[in-house]
Image: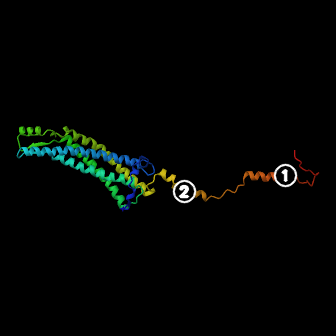
Amino acid sequence: MAIIWGLDLREIKWSKFKSSYMWNNEYHLRRTKFIVYQIAMIFCVVSESLGTAALSDYVDQQDFVEKHSRGASVHNDDFIGAASYNIFVGIFVATIFGAGFFFDLFWPERYESPSVKLAWRICAIIAAIMALSSALTLTIIVATHHAWVSGTDAATARRLLIEYGGSPLRYRDNGRAIASVVFLWPGFVATVASAILLWMSYNHNDKYGPKSTHARNAEGAMPKDIEEESTDLSSLPRNTTQNPTESTTVHSHAGNQVAGMDVEDGPKARYEGV
């Protein structure tokens, strides 16, 4: 298969989705990143999906009222704008950390230029900032704002809204709008955590490579401080002390020779044993 941007497409295999491969501890922060990345994507995408459903209802409400009452308008563009922005944020978060998830899954030892690494870091920060801004905007609008109708009398406006059915003018009465806000805040927290993990992962990769400490030690990689200690020990002089066993043997042999010798100044004696 082709190689695109230095990535071998042959590495895209169903076998890499096996739990024995996905959740191993061979690569630094692999399992933590996979869990947090998916939490960020799931919560943000669910939030924007619920917001999209509420947004669609308010757009249809506008069309219905304006179609059945000439000159009437429903002013709910504040929620439509906030929900539209939240859709973009959800897609952006899913794109950045979804791509990070699959790149780490299929090509954990890929080479990336410094500019690419910088782009990953910047995009992670942007995703966190955008998630925060969307969460604050949507929360404030849903909690404090409401839609209103102009260009017609109150009775006609009330009748048309009842005929349409659904999409209450007060946004906090809309269950899907509330659910979108509720899912968005955990998504924001997980997005911040994902950005931090991405930075930590690249800092580790720049120093030690993608492998975890456990994997590097298993492969025989020796930590730097231990290598320095080994070097210092190798410079010490060798121990020249004689083996105690050999010393004992030498002394015993010498003693036997002395005991078996003739004494010059006294009577001859020979050790005969006990």
Question: As rendered, which of 152 and 94 lies closer to the eye?
Answer: 94
Along the horizontal axis of the image, is 121 left or right of 172?
right
Residue 252: x and y, percent? 80, 51
Secondary element at tag 1: helix
* Mark number displayed over residue 227: 2
Residue that appears at 6% across and 37% down: 155
Q: Residue at x 33, y 58 (%)?
A: 119
Mark 1, residue position? 256
Q: Which residue occupies 31% across, 55% down?
A: 123
For the N terminus, which image quadrant? Answer: bottom left
* CA neighbours of label 2 inside 10 A, class few (<14), some (14 to 19), many (20+): few
The front one of 241 and 105 is 105
Label 2 SS? helix
Tell me which label, 2 or 1, sits earlier in the chain: 2
Q: Quadrant of residue 149?
A: top left
Vertical order, 75 against 263 (above or below): above
Q: How is the image coloured?
A: rainbow
